[in-house]
Image: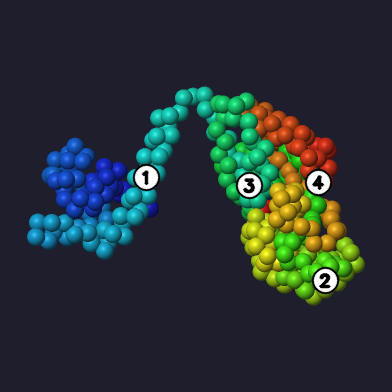
Amino acid sequence: MARITLPTLAAMQCFEASVRHLSFTRAGEELNLTQSAVSKQVAQLEAVLGRPLFRRVRRRLQITPEGALYLGEVRKILSHAEMSTRQLRSYTGRNRVLNVATPHTFGERWLIPHLNGFRFRHPDIDLNICSRDQPLDFETDDIDVAFFVGHGNWPAVECIKLMGETMVPVCSPTLLPDGGITEPLALTRLVLLQTTTRLEAWHDWFQAQDCYTDHSYHGPRFDTFSMTLRAAEAGCGVALVPEFLAANELQAGQLVIAWPFPQENAHAYYLAYPEHKGEVSKIKALVSWIVEQSSAAPSNGDPDEKTIAAGDT
């Protein structure tokens, strides 16, 4: 199959500048080109696209609908090229980018605070942290280290257990009735807030207490624990969440435990990286730091146990 002829960045720059000035002359002044050079570049771009980008009306330029549609894409391409060029020009040979994936709420509430100081110990490592709540594949995704919640069974991947998970129901203190909650099923008279990635959570929590209700799956759903916690804090209902993720709000009194039954979950939080990258220095640096921080920080579950084997939000 024949390859399509692609326009040059120079032609795109001329087009974008011409749109802003609606003048080839002024675009040329900005780009240090002659008016005819800019006009020629735009004409070549129109030839590649097979569409007119400008109309010439009374010696002035007017962008066509096709040109307006193309403009947004051109600006994205130019912006990306400029950013990539700046990044490479700033590369010193010492900086090493480490791509890290983390569940959203875990990253926001546990990982980021525990990264404080890492930069001072490893100034040559630039962390690139992305929120990732869906399963990833180390072979196809550009990820060096991942944090995840599960059972630690990941073929060809080293998994280090960081902490267990205890689920607790929390809500705004203003939501509780006078006299408090007298039994677990009373929570069903309030709104049960659901987290999309843990739709079985309320069912399992009630079942662990030999309670059965048709309301376990009823209630508004939120993509992340962070959103569920915010809804609970706003008084929208009761959230069932890992206790350590709600620690700040519980300590501040913004949330309270609605019923004193902490459920130990089979899930645990892990740090993972491909086995064949175990000796990569930047990965070893982050792993060592996180294990150190995890050991020093209080958490629910079994924080002192580090097991090496084989999304939360």
State whether residue 235 is above or below residue 18.
Answer: below
- Does the CB distance between marks 3 and 1 fall below 8 Å? no
Furthest residue in direction right, as rendered: 210
Q: Which residue is label 2 attached to?
A: 186
User: Which tag is nearer the camera, tag 3 or tag 2?
Assistant: 2
Residue located at (79% from left, 50% from top): 165
Separation of marks 2 and 1 at Cα, in angstroms = 55 Å
Question: Of all residues shown, which one is farthest toward the front?
Answer: 178
Would you call the spot at circle 4 few (<14 residues within 10 Å), some (14-19), or many (20 or more)? Answer: some
Would you name the residue on which mark 4 appears?
Answer: 300
Q: At label 4, which amino acid type do we have?
A: Asn
Query: From mark 3 to mark 2, how far is it between C-alphas?
Result: 32 Å
Q: Position of residue 61 (x, y in %)?
A: 16, 56
Nearer-the-camera pick, 100 or 308:
100
Q: Please give the label number shown on residue 109.
A: none
Element marked by disc 3 = helix
**Residue type highlighted by circle 2:** Ala
Res. 265 image quadrant? bottom right
Name which of mark 3 and mark 2 comes first in the sequence.
3
